Amino acid sequence: MATIALYKSKVNYMPDLISDFKNSVVNLKSDFTNFKNQSLKVNKNICNLDDIVNTISSTTLTW
């Protein structure tokens, strides 16, 4: 019983940690979307940022 009591407080924090992680992922996705939208305003004759953003997005999805 002592072992259960010892880890009880850590286990009780798990839902909060999972929720924080989920929010972080959602925020990251939103940030990438905003970055992509802003970067597409760059003149495509200078640099095709759409390809670069798609590459970055696809690599982050493989984590």
Image: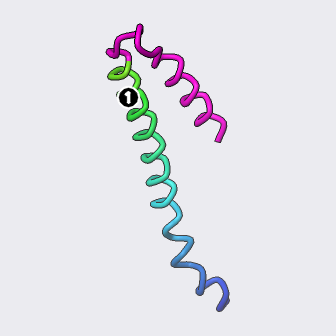
Position of residue 59 measured from the top left corner of the image (x, y, whole percent): 62, 33
Does the stretch in magenta take in 22?
no
Disc tally is: 1
Residue farthest top in this picture: 45
Q: Amino acid at mark 1?
A: Phe
User: Who's the residue at 67% across and 87% down the image?
Assistant: 3
Above-or-below relation of 40 to 33? above
Front residue (pair 5, 29): 29
Q: Would residue 61 be found to the left or right of residue 33 on screen?
A: right
Tell me which corner region of the image, top left, top right, bottom left or bottom right, holds residue 27: top left
SS at circle 1: helix
Q: Which residues are magenta?
A: 40-63
Front residue (pair 24, 44): 44
Quarter of the image that includes the N terminus: bottom right
Position of residue 44 measured from the top left corner of the image (x, y, whole percent): 41, 9
User: Who's the residue at 51% across and 78% down the image?
Assistant: 9
Front residue (pair 61, 56): 56
User: Who's the residue at 32% across and 22% down the image?
Assistant: 38
Position of residue 23 measured from the top left corner of the image (x, y, whole percent): 42, 46
Above-or-below relation of 29 to 39? below
User: Who's the residue at 53% across and 64% down the image?
Assistant: 14
Residue farthest front in this picture: 46
Above-or-below relation of 36 to 48? below
Does the stretch in magenta take in 51?
yes
Quarter of the image that includes the C terminus: top right
The crowding category of the residue bearing disc 1, from other C-alpha atoms within 10 Å (few below 14, some 14 to 19, many at least 20), is few
Tell me which corner region of the image, top left, top right, bottom left or bottom right, holds residue 5: bottom right
Residue at mark 1: 35
Q: Would residue 42 be found to the left or right of residue 3 on screen?
A: left
Position of residue 61 measured from the top left corner of the image (x, y, whole percent): 61, 34
